[in-house]
Image (cartoon, rainbow, N blue to C red):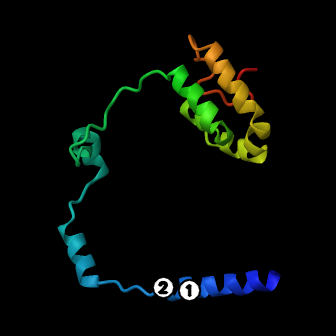
Amino acid sequence: MKKFLLIFSTLFVFAIGSKANYSLNESQLNQAFSNATEVQLVSLLENPAALNLAGVNTFYVASEKNAIVAALLAFFLGGYAIHRYYLGTKGTMFFYYFCTCGGIFGVVPLIDFVMLLVDSKDISKYCNNEKFIMWM
């Protein structure tokens, strides 16, 4: 079995490497750079509307976090700490959940789910909470 995996992985690497032959058309690249619009940071600071290049409103007011949405995220995707990201926790929480196999095998997200439903009136204490166990 080890020999099979070694041969398969070697063939896979060679197959990927043989498909990496690409060519770059320098004339098209130079033309794209010559047709590009130059944007400077000073002009963006003076005119923030210049960021709206695609016609999409980039300025919006963030609404408060919804307890039901956070609870549903905790129930369905709790092992990946998606509900914690929704509530404003930094990315290190994903690492903690990964190291503890989804928050101590799903126990922490399950209790998060229950606590978010019980305290659905005021979840401000759970927002931007950096503790691993957010209800303590």
Q: Which residue is mark 1?
A: 15
Q: Is residue 58 above or below residue 112?
A: below
Residue 27 visible? The answer is: yes
Task: Give the alpha-carbon distance from disc 1 to disc 2, as whole Å.
Answer: 7 Å
Picture residue at 58% right of the left edge, 36% below the top: 85
Q: In the image, residue 134 lies at what x, y percent?
A: 70, 25
Residue at 63 percent of width and 22 percent of height:
126
Q: Residues within 10 Å of mark 2 (few under 14, many from 20)?
A: few
Q: Secondary structure at mark 1?
A: helix
Q: Residue at x 71, y 29 (%)?
A: 110
Q: Residue 30 sits in which quadrant?
A: bottom left
Q: How many marks?
A: 2
Mark 1 surroundings within 10 Å by alpha-carbon count, few (fewer than 14), some (14 through 19), many (20 or more): few
Q: What's the residue at 61%, 36% (across, down)?
A: 76
Q: Is residue 39 above or below residue 48?
A: below
Most distant residue in the left direction? 35
Q: Is residue 136 above or below residue 43?
A: above
Q: Are marks 1 and 2 in contact (CB under 8 Å)?
A: yes
Quadrant in the rendering for residue 82: top right
x, y (%) of residue 107? Answer: 77, 32
Say which of 56 and 113 sits in front: 113
Front residue of this view, candidates 119 and 25 = 119
Residue 19: mark in rendering: 2
For the N terminus, which image quadrant?
A: bottom right
Q: Position of residue 63 (x, y in %)?
A: 42, 23
